[in-house]
Image (spheres, rainbow, N blue to C red):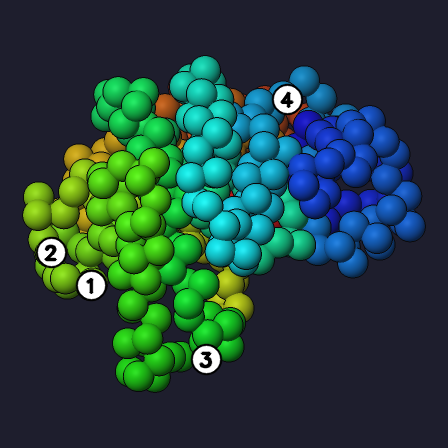
C-alpha cells in the first residue's frame, strides 16, 4: 500500500485502509474500489489523503502505532468535553488506551499523518502531540504511569485555546502584537481549566502550562529556561512544534517532516532540549513507508523500508521500473539522494 493525496487518487483505485467518520465509525472498509462518486464525496467531507493498494506498492504494509479510529474517537470526545465544559478526567480511559497502544507497538514506525480534515485542527493536533510525546517518553525510559501523565498533558495542552476568539485562531495574516498577547494566554487558561480536576496529576498541569516555554528562556508565559522547565514541558515543546509545522494551517501549507526535523535539530539547546530532540528523532520518520518521493535524477519512487541509523537513505522502489534500490547499503547509488516528499 501507499499514501496519496486525495487529489491524486484515480477512480478504480483500491482502498488499502478503512476510513473513519465522526465518533470513529468506519465509513469505508479496505478493498473498496474507489469510484468517482465516492472520491467526490470524500473530498466534500474534507478527507485530504488515502492509503491505496496498487501494483507499484504491492507487498508494502503500513502498520499503525495507534489505530486511526481511536485517534478520531479521542479527538471527538475531547471536542465534546471542552465545548460543553465537561469533566476533563473523562479523557483518562482514552489516554490510557493510547499509551497502551504505543507501548505495545513501540517498535513500529511512527507515521503522523491525518487522513481527515473534517475536524477542527486543534483537537486532532492535541491527539497527535500526545502520541509524539508518549513515544519520546518511551525512548527516555519513563514509567508507564508517567507516560499516562505525559499523554494527558499532550491531549490537554491546547485546551486553553477554547477561551481564545475563533477569529484570532483562524486568522490567515500575521497577528498584531495585541492579538499575539491574547494568544499567548492560552497555556495559563488551560492550566486554570485543569486546576479543579483532582484526577489529573500536577505534572500534567505543569506540562500544559509550560509547553510554550523555550530552553533559552525566550518562551512564555513565564520565560523559564533549561531545567527550570519540567521534562514534560520540554517534551511537549518539541512534539507541539513538530506537529504544528507538519500540518496545513490557515496561513501556510505544511512543512515536510525533514524540514521540521532539521528545524528542531538546528535549535537544539537553544529553543529545545537536545536530550529530548535526540529521543524525538528516533521516533519519527522523515520519509514514511508507503510515501512517494522524488530523487535528484527526477525519478519517483515509493519508500519500502527505513533505517533508523540512516533516516535520509531508505530502501525504495522506483515507480517506473519497479526496481528496488537500497540507498543506504548499495554503493552503486551513492550519487542518488531524495530531494522531496511528493504528497
For the N terminus, the quadrant is top right
SS for callout 4: loop
Q: CA distance from mark 1 to mark 3?
A: 23 Å
Q: CA distance from mark 4 to mark 3?
A: 41 Å
Considering only vertical position in the picture, is 285 above or below 158?
A: above
Name the residue rendered at 45%, 20% in the picture.
100
CA neighbours of label 4 inside 10 A, class few (<14), some (14 to 19), many (20+):
some
- Mark 1 vs 4: CB contact within 8 A: no
Q: Which residue is mark 2?
A: 224
Q: Which residue is mark 1?
A: 221
Residue 111 horizontal/vertical position (percent): 50, 34
Residue 46 horizontal/vertical position (percent): 70, 55
Q: Which residue is mark 3?
A: 173
Which of marks 3 and 4 precedes in the sequence? 4
Q: CA distance from mark 3 to mark 2?
A: 29 Å
Q: Is residue 49 left or right of residue 269?
A: right
**Between marks 1 and 4 in the image, the one whose residue lies nearer the viewer:** 1
Q: Is residue 142 left or right of residue 94?
A: left
CA neighbours of label 3 inside 10 A, class few (<14), some (14 to 19), many (20+):
few
Considering only vertical position in the picture, is 91 above or below 226?
A: above
**Between marks 4 and 3 in the image, the one whose residue lies nearer the viewer:** 3
Considering only vertical position in the picture, is 135 above or below 196?
A: above
Residue 109 horizontal/vertical position (percent): 47, 25
Which of marks 2 and 3 precedes in the sequence? 3
Name the residue rendered at 79%, 38% in the picture.
27
Depth check: 145 or 36 in front? Answer: 145
Name the residue rendered at 23%, 40% in the picture.
202
Which of marks 2 and 4 precedes in the sequence? 4
Q: CA distance from mark 1 to mark 2?
A: 8 Å
**Residue 60 — which label?**
4
Counting the numbered discs, the total is: 4
Q: CA distance from mark 1 to mark 4?
A: 45 Å
Amino acid at each position: 500500500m501507499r499514501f496519496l493525496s486525495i487529489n491524486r487518487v484515480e477512480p478504480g483505485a483500491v482502498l488499502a485502509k478503512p476510513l473513519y467518520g465522526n465518533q470513529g465509525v468506519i465509513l469505508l472498509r479496505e478493498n473498496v474500489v474507489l469510484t468517482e462518486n465516492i472520491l467526490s464525496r470524500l473530498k466534500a467531507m474534507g478527507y485530504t489523503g488515502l492509503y491505496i493498494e496498487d501494483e507499484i506498492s504491492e507487498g508494502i504494509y503500513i502498520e499503525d502505532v495507534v489505530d486511526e479510529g481511536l485517534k478520531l474517537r479521542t479527538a471527538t470526545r475531547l471536542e465534546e468535553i471542552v465545548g460543553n465544559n465537561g469533566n476533563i478526567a473523562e479523557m483518562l480511559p482514552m489516554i490510557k488506551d493510547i499509551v497502551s497502544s504505543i507501548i505495545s507497538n513501540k517498535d513500529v514506525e511512527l507515521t503522523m499523518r491525518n487522513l481527515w480534515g473534517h475536524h477542527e485542527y486543534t483537537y486532532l493536533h492535541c491527539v497527535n502531540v500526545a502520541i509524539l510525546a508518549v513515544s519520546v517518553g518511551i525512548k527516555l525510559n519513563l514509567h508507564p504511569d508517567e507516560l499516562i501523565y505525559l499523554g494527558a498533558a499532550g491531549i490537554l495542552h491546547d485546551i486553553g485555546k477554547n477561551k481564545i476568539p475563533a477569529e484570532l485562531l483562524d486568522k490567515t495574516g500575521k497577528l498584531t502584537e495585541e492579538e499575539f498577547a491574547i494568544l499567548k494566554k492560552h497555556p495559563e487558561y488551560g492550566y486554570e481549566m485543569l486546576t479543579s480536576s483532582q484526577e489529573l496529576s500536577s505534572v500534567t498541569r505543569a506540562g500544559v502550562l509550560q509547553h510554550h516555554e523555550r530552553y533559552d528562556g525566550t518562551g512564555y508565559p513565564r520565560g523559564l529556561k533549561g531545567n527550570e522547565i519540567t521534562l514534560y514541558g520540554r517534551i511537549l515543546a518539541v512534539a507541539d512544534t513538530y506537529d504544528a509545522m507538519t500540518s496545513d494551517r490557515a496561513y501556510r501549507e505544511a512543512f515536510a517532516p525533514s524540514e521540521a526535523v532539521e528545524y528542531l535539530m538546528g535549535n537544539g539547546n537553544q529553543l529545545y532540549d537536545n536530550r529530548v530532540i535526540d529521543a524525538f528523532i528516533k521516533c519519527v520518520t522523515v520519509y514514511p513507508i508507503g510515501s512517494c518521493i522524488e530523487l535528484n535524477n527526477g525519478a519517483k519512487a515509493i519508500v519500502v523500508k527505513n533505517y533508523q541509523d540512516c533516516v535520509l537513505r531508505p530502501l525504495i522502489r522506483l515507480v517506473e521500473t519497479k526496481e528496488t534500490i537500497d540507498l543506504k547499503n548499495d554503493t552503486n547509488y551513492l550519487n542518488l539522494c531524495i530531494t522531496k516528499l511528493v504528497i
